Image (cartoon, rainbow, N blue to C red):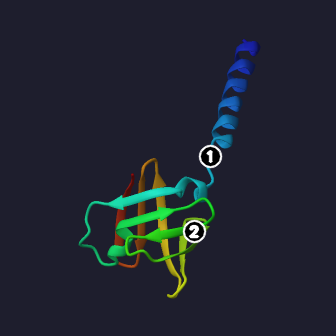
Amino acid sequence: MKKKILFVALILLFAAFLGACSSEDPETALVGTWECRDASIPHRWLCNLTFYENGMFTDRDGDSGSFTINGNSLTFNFDDFDPFIVTFNLSRNRLTLTADDLRVVLNRQ
């Protein structure tokens, strides 16, 4: 019986270890092009975003800059504008951005 308990405990420990090792860096997970389906929202520039591995982004209007992540905050640092900070939630191929009364859902392309 002790061997079975020890075996089950080892399996659970191994599964927890694998889960911890598979977590992806949020900045890496954002890399790619994201588009929203509703282009009538305020801040329509958010409807097409491309994030690059070098920490840069481009929006649908062709504006670009760098981005940084701190926890669940995503900061867009534009070259010609003030930084724009949103809260983000990344779930597989869905990226949700929220700020004040703004909520944008984007899908990975």
Residue at x 23% of width, y 72% of height: 40
Q: Dot 1: what SS?
A: loop
Q: Report the side of 34 relative to 16 (left or right).
A: left
Q: Dot 2: what SS?
A: strand
Kindly indicate the quadrant of the structure image that contains residue 70.
bottom right
Between 56 and 102, the one lying in front of the other is 56
Front tag of 1 and 2: 2
Residue at the far front: name it: 62
User: Gap in Å between the C-alphas at discs 1 and 2?
Assistant: 22 Å
Callout 1, which amino acid? Ser
Above/below status of 42 relative to 16 = below
Between 3 and 38, the one lying in front of the other is 38
Kindly indicate the quadrant of the structure image that contains residue 54.
bottom right
Q: Name the residue tied to disc 2.
A: 56
Residue at x 63% of width, y 39% of height: 19
Q: Name the residue tied to disc 1.
A: 23
Residue at x 55% of width, y 65% of height: 72
Kindly indicate the quadrant of the structure image that contains residue 34.
bottom left
Q: Report the side of 105 relative to 38 (left or right).
A: right
Between 87 and 14, the one lying in front of the other is 87
Tag 2: Cα neighbours inside 10 Å, few (<14), some, or many (≥20)? Answer: some
Residue at x 44% of width, y 57% of height: 33
- Residue 105: x, y in percent? 35, 61
Count of residue discs: 2
- Residue 24: x, y in percent? 61, 49
Tag 1: Cα neighbours inside 10 Å, few (<14), some, or many (≥20)? Answer: few
- Residue 68: x, y in percent? 60, 70
Q: Report the side of 34 relative to 12 (left or right).
A: left
